[in-house]
Amino acid sequence: MTTARQSSVHLEPPRSADVPHPAHLVLHRLRPAAGVIVRRRWDLTIRGAEHVPTEGPVVIAANHIGFVDGPLMAIVAPRPVHVLAKHEMYHGSLGTFLNASGQIPVERNGPDPAAVKTALRVLRDGGAVGVFPEGTRGTGEVDRVKPGAAYLAMAAGATVVPLVFLGTRLPGGSTNSVPPARSQFVMTFGEPLRVEHHRWPRRQPETHALSGRIREALLATLDEAQQATGMTLPGPIPATDKEIL
């Protein structure tokens, strides 16, 4: 049930009062069964789950190395996550499923007000949103962080939790590849960043400063995860990979 406070924050710019909450029944109901399937297929380890708040708005900001990162975040994170996924994926049966499971299409080549408002709808309702601030699949080294995750956290007063994926793409593999059965996957959640609610306007220096903190948190989580597990990032992606064309 939406509280009076949640109703009021939906009126703040950018307004999310008239934006429907993404579908969530499939996401909530299928997570247990989907989680079992994932763990049967791959050797999955989740570290630092205690860092994810059990309630309230949360932005999970993750590095991005492979095709399965988004589904894993939605399925096996400690709580249901509405993940921002590139709009090119929303076609055919895959697009139907993504919409039914409450994932959020986003245009990566420029501002996407619809995606921002939908993500804010989730956060202002007390939910969790997943963001890949690198902007695309790649090496996962977090060389840059786009400001979207920071903006959402500031607009909703959401906690930011860094997440690092290891193993979800094999060295030399395409960003669209899926590692074979029994491959080792590790998801490491880092120390959360508490972000205060910033009222409009939210100025560029503020979002850039928070983006820098998010990048530092991701790098710290990546370093800890690699040292603790002995795993490494998969390295460069093939030069012909569509993700970088």
Image (cartoon, helix red, strand yellow):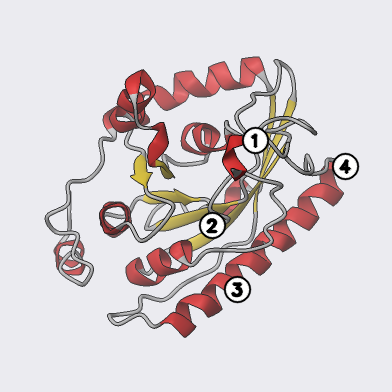
Relative vertical location of residue 144 with respect to residue 236 in this rendering, above or below: below
* Left or right of residue 224, residue 77 in this image: left
Mark 1: few, some, or many residues within 10 Å (few <14, many ≥20)? Answer: few
Q: CA distance from mark 3 to mark 4?
A: 26 Å
Mark 3 vs 4, N-terminal side: 3
Looking at the rendered image, the disc whose residue lies closer to the viewer, 3 or 4, is 3
Q: Nearer the viewer, residue 119 or 92?
A: 92
Q: Which residue is mark 4?
A: 230
User: Which residue type does callout 2 highlight?
Assistant: Pro
- Residue type at mark 4? Gly
> Distance from label 1 to label 2 (Cα)?
20 Å
Q: Is label 2 in a helix, a strand or a loop? A: loop
Relative side of 179 to 209, left or right: right
* Residue linked to disc 3: 212
**Other residues around mark 2 within 10 Å, as few (<14) / some (14–19) / many (≥20):** many
- Name which of mark 1 and mark 2 comes first in the sequence: 2
Q: Earlier in the sequence, mark 3 or mark 2?
A: 2
Residue at screen point 36% across, 30% down: 98
Residue 241 shows which numbered tag? 1
Callout 3 touching callout 4 (CB < 8 Å): no
Residue 74 vertical placement versus 224 (above, below): above
Q: What residue is at 39 percent from the left and 72 percent from the top?
A: 154
